[in-house]
Image: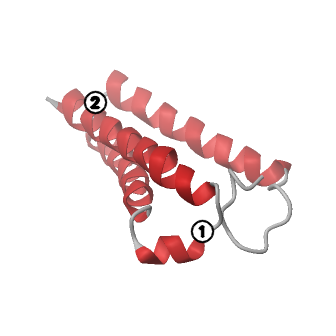
């Protein structure tokens, strides 16, 4: 559990509903990216760029003292810097590429 949640005092994994909400959010982002590729336009482009901003902010937050104070528990903190943060940055950059490339 400590690899998934880095906050102090958390003793259980998130339940089914929070996990399904994260799954639904990721599927929505994938659908937005497909929408942008299949039907380039301003609305899908803005939606994909908004999703990209969320990933980019989450990815960059890994290296801020505020985020380290929120999620300091190991091994999450180490994995956050080595895997989770860079993955969010890569996903955000990919979404920016999709949004800007499909418009060209």
- From the top left corner, tell me how far across and down residue 19 is, in percent: 75, 47
Q: Residue at x 24, y 28 (%)?
A: 102
Which residue, given by chain and number where applicable, does mark 2 sit on? 40
Mark in the foreground, 1 or 2: 1
Q: Characterize the local packing of mark 1: few (<14), some (14-19) or many (20 or more) Cα atoms within 10 angstroms.
A: some
Residue 75 located left or right of residue 85? right
| Residue 73 quadrant | bottom right
Q: Residue at x 58, y 74 (%)?
A: 70
Above or below, 9 relative to 19: below
Describe the element under mark 1 as helix, strand or loop.
loop
Q: Most extreme residue toward the top, as rendered?
A: 38
Q: Residue at x 65, y 48 (%)?
A: 22
Q: Nearer the viewer, residue 76 or 33?
A: 76
Residue at mark 1 to residue at mark 2: CA–CA distance: 38 Å
Residue 38 located left or right of residue 42? right
Describe the element under mark 2 as helix, strand or loop.
loop
Q: Quadrant of the C terminus?
A: top left
Which residue, given by chain and number where applicable, does mark 1 sit on? 71
């Amino acid at each position: 559990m400590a690899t998934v949640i880095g906050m102090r005092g958390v003793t259980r994994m998130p339940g089914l509903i929070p996990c399904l909400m994260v799954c639904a959010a990721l599927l929505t982002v994938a659908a937005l990216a497909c929408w942008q590729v299949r039907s380039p336009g301003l609305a899908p482009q803005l939606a994909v760029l908004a999703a990209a901003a969320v990933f980019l902010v989450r990815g960059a937050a890994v290296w801020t003292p505020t985020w380290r104070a929120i999620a300091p528990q190991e091994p999450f903190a180490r994995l956050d810097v080595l895997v989770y943060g860079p993955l969010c940055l890569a996903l955000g950059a990919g979404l920016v590429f999709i949004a800007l490339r499909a418009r060209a």
